Each structure stands twice: as C-alpha cells, then as structure tokens.
Amino acid sequence: MEVDAAGRASTLCDAAVAGDRLALSRLLTAVENRTPVAEAALRRLYPAAGRAHLVGITGPPGSGKSTLVAALIAEVRAAGRPVAVIAVDPSSPITGGALLGDRVRMQAYADDGDVFIRSMASRGHAGGLASTSTAAAAVLDAAGFDLILIETVGTGQSEVEVAAAADTTVVLEAPEMGDEVQAIKAGLLEVADLVVVNKGDKPGAQRTAAQLRAMLVASAPRDPADARPRPKRPEVLITTAATGAGVPELLAALDRHRVAGRDGLSAAARLARAEAQVWAIVADRLRERLHDPVHEAATGALLEEVARHRLDPYAAADRLLAEIESD
Amino acid sequence: MEVDAAGRASTLCDAAVAGDRLALSRLLTAVENRTPVAEAALRRLYPAAGRAHLVGITGPPGSGKSTLVAALIAEVRAAGRPVAVIAVDPSSPITGGALLGDRVRMQAYADDGDVFIRSMASRGHAGGLASTSTAAAAVLDAAGFDLILIETVGTGQSEVEVAAAADTTVVLEAPEMGDEVQAIKAGLLEVADLVVVNKGDKPGAQRTAAQLRAMLVASAPRDPADARPRPKRPEVLITTAATGAGVPELLAALDRHRVAGRDGLSAAARLARAEAQVWAIVADRLRERLHDPVHEAATGALLEEVARHRLDPYAAADRLLAEIESD
C-alpha cells in the first residue's frame, strides 16, 4: 500500500510539475482527502515549493470577492503571468461541494494552462482547513504557479485564519450606506495587509475608504506576540471589480507587498503556516495511533466515559498522553 | 500557582452553582482564556454536567438567528424554565469582541437570574471554538441551566461544527425570493435535526418550506460514519421570530427531539463533543511541552526548517513525535 502510494505519487508529481493539469487536479483531490498519496506527494514536492506569493483574499459576504478574483486573474494573465486560485468554499461542512460561479469562472480559462482554479470545501476536522489549504498551495507552488490567490469568506474562524496565514492578506469591503463598516464589525481589519473597498462605483465608496483610513490610523498594532514587523499601516485601495477599475493598482500593491515580504515581512506568516501544517500532521498521527487496533477499545472506552461525564476531559487527555508515551 | 488556581476555582464554582452570576461570568472568562482556573473548575464541575439539553442554532447571515433566540428565551421563560445562551460571535478572530445586539438583549433580562447570555468570540487556535464552547456549556450545565442555546453563524467550518455538535441542531432559513435556498447552498441541511423557515410573514415562506421538505425527502443520509440513528427526516417549521408566531411549536419540537435523544439519538453528538474537548486538551498539553524551556529551541528550529522548505512537514511531525516519546 505504502509502496503503491509512493509510486502513484511520484507519477502524478512528475506529470503535474511537467504541466499536466489533470495530474495536478488528482494531487489536490488526494490532499483534500488526506490520502497516503498526498503524504508521499507532499514529501516529494515540498522542497520545490516556498517560492510562490500566497495572497489571501477575504471579506464579508457581498463584498464581491469572487468578482475581484476574476478581475485579478484577467489582470495577471494580461501581464503573461501564471496564477492559481484556491477558493475555500464555505458550502458543505460535510459533503463538500463546489457549486456556483466557480465552474462558470473556470470555463473562461478552460483552455488556458496558466490559470488553475480549485474549489476546496470547508470540511474535515478542526484545523483541517488551514493545513489542507496550505498543503494545496505547496502543491500548486511546486507545480510552478508563482502567484496563488486564496479566497475565503470572512465570517468563520477557520476561514479568516486561512486568509490571514497568506504572505499578503487582502480584506475586502463594500461601500456602506449606514455608518457601520462590515469589516470593522467583523474584526477583519486586524488581519489586513491591504484593504480594498470594492464596488467603487457605488455611492459611499470614497466615504467608506476615508472611514477605513481613519480607523487604521487609530487602530492598535497586531497581537503583540506577532513578531512580524508591521508596515506603517495597510493601504486602502478602491476597486470596481466588475469593470476592472483599480485592479492594476491592486496588483501593483500586491507586488510591492511581496517585495517587502522578502525583506522579512512574511516570515511570521510562513512560520505560522508551517506550524499549522506540522500540528495537523502530529494530531492525525496521534489520532491514528490511538484508534489503531491495539488502542481502539481503550480510547473508545475513555471517550465514552467523558461523554457520560464519569471522567473529566483533562483526566482523559492525561491518560491518552500516558498511553502514547508508554508505547 | 496550581494551588492558587484550584482554590480560586473552588470558590468560583461553589458560588456559581449557588446562583452567583458574577462568579459564573468569571468562570466563563477563564474558560475562554484557557487559564489554570478553567482547568481546575472544569475538573470540579464536569461530573455535575451532562444533564442539560444543548441546542445549536445556525443559519446563513440574515436568517434572523438572534431574533429567534430572543423569541425562544421569551417562550422558555414564560414556561418558568431557566435558559442560557452561548452566542458564538464571528466578529474578531483576534481581539475577540462582543459587540452589538448582545448587550441590548442582555438588558431585557438583566434582573432575571434564570437567563444567562454569553457572547464568545471566534478566536484562538484551530479547534478552539468547539472545545471552548463545549467547556462553557458544561459550566452552564453544572450551574443548573437545563436548556442551553448555542447560536452560531452558518458560514464558517468551525461555527457550523459547534452548532452541529449540539444534542439538537436547528438550521434557520429565510424565505427566498429566487429559487436558491441559502441553507441548501451552504450544505447546512445535512447537520439539521430541525429546519426553521423564519420570517414566516414574508412572501415565499410557504414555498421555501415546501422546497425544503422536498429536498429533505430526497436527501441522502448523514455521513455513513455517523452511527447516530437518524429520525425519518428533519421536521420543517415556520416561525416569525419578530412576532413570536410559531415559536411555541418550535420549543415543543425541541422538547420532543430531546426526549428522542434520551433514547440514543444524541449519543453520537455527546461522544463527538467529548472527543473534541479531549483532543483540544491533548493538543494543548503537547504544544506546551514542545514549547517548554527544554524543547523550545529544538521545536522552533524544526518549524523554521519547514517554513524554509528545507524539511517537509511530515518529517517534522515525526521528529516532534519522537521527541515526545523519548521524554
């Protein structure tokens, strides 16, 4: 089985790196499903990754994320650069499911080998989203995509974390009629490297941008534990994704932030991604071990005791840890 | 320090169980911040918990979750029963932050000792949301709240998981004008024990309910790995939370589902909650150990190697596991 997985991974990796998009798709499916092929492929591809610019794009529903991503793709392609998109679909936590506009968008670039769009469901156990999207980005990176956009909806803990772990995080906002700016309400500004007021042709866009700039001057720095040196403050841009207005300026701002990142700005983001990935694997390995034929019965009984409130979860955790150490 | 925490926890627990709401608030703050007091308190309170009915309420933004929760509180109080609410606030992933309507709602029950409303931020590391809300529910349960409503926005992986891990999961939906039912689009139906079309006075409510009933007849069963016996199919109710219409029927349906749960329907949910809690503690313990003064340097260097793509994350995970076992 292990040998099979390694063999299959090596075939798929070679093909994906050589430009075979079907092989790339299959690798990403393996990554999503955490199969042995995914492990073998990631071990193989990881040293070749780490060069791409990962850009997280998040914002409240209705801010026009997908339209902006489509406009960015057009802009990047006009410059002759390849681009990959990981769209973290909040749809099904259980069946997954890539519905919607995704396929429509895909269609426009069906014959363009330098555009790769992949939908990933928000599913799997806790922490799965961050490690899966990081692993998917590593595969795309190794396959030669130099710019990887990760689109998430800015209303879930895991989803915001995924976008915030990119080298550059773009927070979108739509012009507001009232005085309540959604991204502020949702605390999204704190993860922003760039703030974009989209739907710039709507009334209120300039006012919302001004409000955001004022907020950002006043706002406190990030979590003090975050060692990443912070630029003076996030730039606020205005785009109209539907017409493409402001999109060249956004791409230029992304490229500037990338260059700044090379000087150390994104080191913390890279470390955070590495940590999320390693921890997810440690957790998977432990879970596997505690549910293997030797330990399954004991683990199950212990969790059952906790479910029945006959044992507290701390005592159960300590027993599981003792179990691991005594192996 | 340990002794101090145990002493403080015991004082707070005794007071909280005796009805001191300030002590209860302090315990929940400790739980949110994962302090040593929280651990000591949970170990103490856990055996007394496990009796309450946990009801998850989730749905897309705009479906009226908060209004429905307020209407349910009124209905439950009219019956003379105590009720606690954990509102998982999607606001800030970083500063946390209980903004909004919450405080306003709180106000109405400021003098009612049998209503306790608590906002919890979606923050902390992956998996934190599920284990923190489960721990908070255990504290409220031990403090005598027999019905605990857990309100989350249905657009994030973690948030949906939290609601889905309740004994009874209610999925809200607003009447749709178009033919696209949001909860279906978001895959929320699959976690539903009860489906509620709220804003029942709006045109389209009956049609949306009919559409949902048709969907539910056609829909496949849950994840086959979920051993929980599933009732024929989720009931679909119509409420108008703003006027209270349909809310007595909803409460009756919740109570019926609770009774059914006693016959085994919610055993899987209880086991899932226990597992989430135990795993979060195992992960915390391991993380602490690998970042303690003895291991910190080695762990940091290892993660740095992964961040630089000189080591793949699987190899790093295996080294960390070996480290733990060799202790």
Image (cartoon, coloured by chain):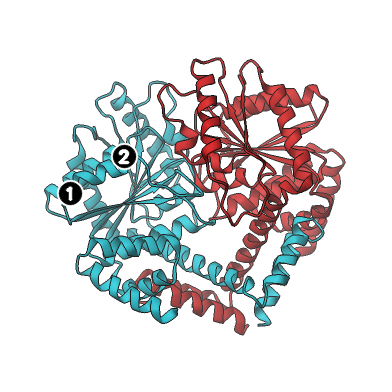
Chain colours: A red, B cyan
- Residue in the image at 54% along x and 72% along y: B285
- SS of the residue at dot 1? helix
Count residues near mark 2 (Cα–Cα under 10 Å), then give few for <14, some for 14-19, many for 20+: few
> Disc 1 residue type?
Val
Q: Which circle marks residue B57 in the picture?
A: none
Count residues near mark 1 (Cα–Cα under 10 Å), then give few for <14, some for 14-19, many for 20+: some
Q: Nearer the viewer, residue A314 or B55?
A: A314
Q: Is residue A67 visible?
A: yes
Q: Position of residue B99 (x, y in %)?
A: 37, 42
The reply to whether callout 2 and callout 1 are in contact (CB within 8 Å) is: no
Q: Position of residue A149 (x, y in %)?
A: 68, 36
- Residue in the image at 75% along x and 66% along y: B301
Q: Which of A251 and B140 is in front in this view?
A: A251
Quarter of the image that includes the N terminus of chain A? bottom right
- Residue in the image at 20% along x and 36% along y: B246
Which chain letter matches label 2?
B
In the rendered image, residues at marks 2 and 1 fall on the same chain: yes
Q: Which circle marks residue B76 in the picture?
A: 1
Q: Where is residue A110 in the image (x, y as percent from the top left)?
A: 74, 26
Q: Nearer the viewer, residue B211 or B24?
A: B24
Q: Mark 2 against mark 1, which lies toward the viewer?
A: 2
Q: Can residue B268 be seen in this view?
A: no
Q: Which of marks 2 and 1 is nearer the N terminus?
A: 1
> Disc 2 residue type?
Gly
Q: Mark 2 points at which residue?
A: B101
Q: How many labels does the image show?
A: 2
